[in-house]
Amino acid sequence: MGAISQAEPVICVKEVWLKAYSTIDSNVRRSARMGVSMKELSTAEWYVMESLWKDSPKVGSRVVADLKDSVGWSRSTTLTMLKRMTDKGLISCEDGESMKVYRPLLEREEAARKETENFLERVYHGSLSMLLNHFVEKQSLSREEIAQLRRILDQADEK
């Protein structure tokens, strides 16, 4: 489907968001108040976690090779990160037959959820409607994208 004019999707999406805003925004604020405990990941930690989420368990030499290929890290940099992240409780390290074996102790979905909540709170003061309004005003949405947003909001409204 082709994109529709800028004015039409903005009006449609804003109306849909006004309908479900209170439900979604209250859920985000409730999560923030509960102080869900998950350690925030640095950019470097995300690199290591992505390697482990992709394929785990993984021996240290495979993590070293992954991060050399993806971000250009040296062996010592990767091993230092693995040690620090083990000490922080983000990953586990077990002695294998001849090498250490690493596993993530944090699910990717949980990390992504927390990162999203932190971004929303930091940049948009916890307001989901401000975030979405920003994107809707800056981009032209197709009818398909608008329909998808409506489905998401209808599901949120039913909860």
Image: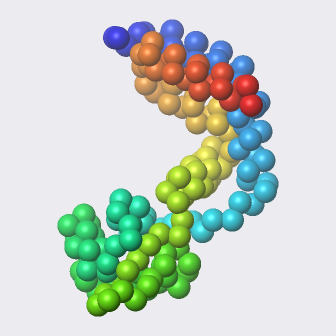
Q: In this view, does 8 lie above or below 115?
A: above
Which quarter of the rendered picture does the N terminus lie within? top left
Q: As rendered, which of 14 and 51 lies closer to the eye?
A: 51
Name the residue at 53% across, 60% down.
107
Provide residue 74's location: percent of width, then percent of height: 24, 80
Q: As rendered, which of 124 and 43 lies closer to the eye?
A: 43
Which quarter of the rendered picture does the C terminus lie within? top right
> For residue 144, which quarter of the picture?
top left
Say how the picture is coloured. rainbow
Provide residue 132's location: percent of width, then percent of height: 57, 31
Name the residue at 31% across, 80% down.
60
> For residue 5, which quarter of the picture?
top left
Q: Is residue 20 at all visible to an observer of this figure?
A: yes
Name the residue at 30% across, 74% down.
63
Provide residue 143's location: percent of width, then percent of height: 45, 12
Q: In this view, does 26 lie above or below 150?
A: below
Name the residue at 58% across, 21% down.
151
Q: Is residue 21 above or below residue 88?
A: above
Provide residue 110's location: percent of width, then percent of height: 57, 56
Q: In this view, does 25 lie to the left or right of 42?
A: right
Q: Is residue 81 at all visible to an observer of this figure?
A: no
